[in-house]
Image: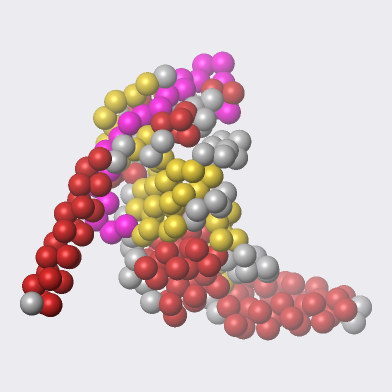
Amino acid sequence: MSILRNFIKESIHEYLNEQQMLKENWYHGTPDAREVEENGGFTDRTKTISYVTDPKKFDQHREKMNLAIKNGDMDTYDKLLNMTGDFKKDFTYKKPIFLCDKYSVAKTYADPKRAFDYQNALEKVYEVDIECDKIAKIVATGDRFRFVSIDKVRQGFINSGVSSEEIDKLISMFNYYISDNKGIQTDVIAAIGNYLGFDCIDVIGVLDSYDGGTVKSTVRMVLNPSNVKIKRNER
């Protein structure tokens, strides 16, 4: 009987998740939609960020640099500084398309004054469909989207099937420049998601708008722009 109850429970859970996904509305706001209009949709662009190949050795290297400064040994410091690049490599990935489940939040990003050519800019909010087979869900209630708690990011990836050992290593590799171990920027989250092979990352409950915002919403990072299909657009 317990096996049957578990089967029924899991089936109901899957059904409810499917129904919730069917009800979701996703929006993308842009200050200038001319390129999207000309291309008939979103196109791939890439971004490159650096990471450290061996976080432990890199921390030891930084400790040596700090000690050299403390001792006033600038010759040693300069030598160590020149060696810093040996610990780093570049990771290139597709820039995500950012969506929101609230139209009002997406609308804040459709301000033509943000565009390079603001006098001719075509501001729009698109309603879109997305295909996401593998989704990471990060519950970040109350955090600002641009700088999410490392603990929340870590737990989100673990809950999405990544081992604690692997996500700890990747955070150390990609978030090496943050010393207080408290926050992680959006581009780093996207890079880690790409590295792990996710299609989308949902950051749930964040406070997001172009100017900061006080409205809680879910921001979805679509890591493959070709998976975003425009349904309609509004000014």
> In the picture, residue 229 is in which quadrant?
top left
Q: Specify the segment rendered in magenta.
A: 114-135
Compared to 11, does 210 lie above or below?
A: above
Left or right: where does residue 6 sit relative to residue 120? left
Is any atom of residue 173 visible in this view?
Answer: yes
Residue 89 horizontal/vertical position (percent): 54, 68
Foreground of the two, 36 or 17: 17
Is any atom of residue 223 visible in this view?
Answer: no
The total of numbered circles placed on residues is: 0
Direction right: furthest residue:
72
Task: Determine if the magenta segment contains residue 134.
Answer: yes
Q: Quadrant of the C terminus?
A: top left
Residue 84 horizontal/vertical position (percent): 67, 73
At 27% from the left and 51% from the top, the residue drawn is 132
At 21% from the left and 52% from the top, the residue drawn is 16
Q: Quadrant of the N terminus?
A: bottom left
Residue 198 horizontal/vertical position (percent): 33, 60
Left or right: where does residue 125 sit relative to residue 3? right
Foreground of the two, 233 or 54: 233
At 46% from the left and 22% from the top, the residue drawn is 123
Residue 73 horizontal/vertical position (percent): 89, 80
Task: Determine if the magenta segment contains residue 141.
Answer: no
Foreground of the two, 231 or 224: 231
> In the picture, residue 201 is in which quadrant?
bottom left
Direction front: furthest residue:
1
At 91% from the left and 78% from the top, the residue drawn is 72
What sort of colour scheme is used for the picture?
secondary structure
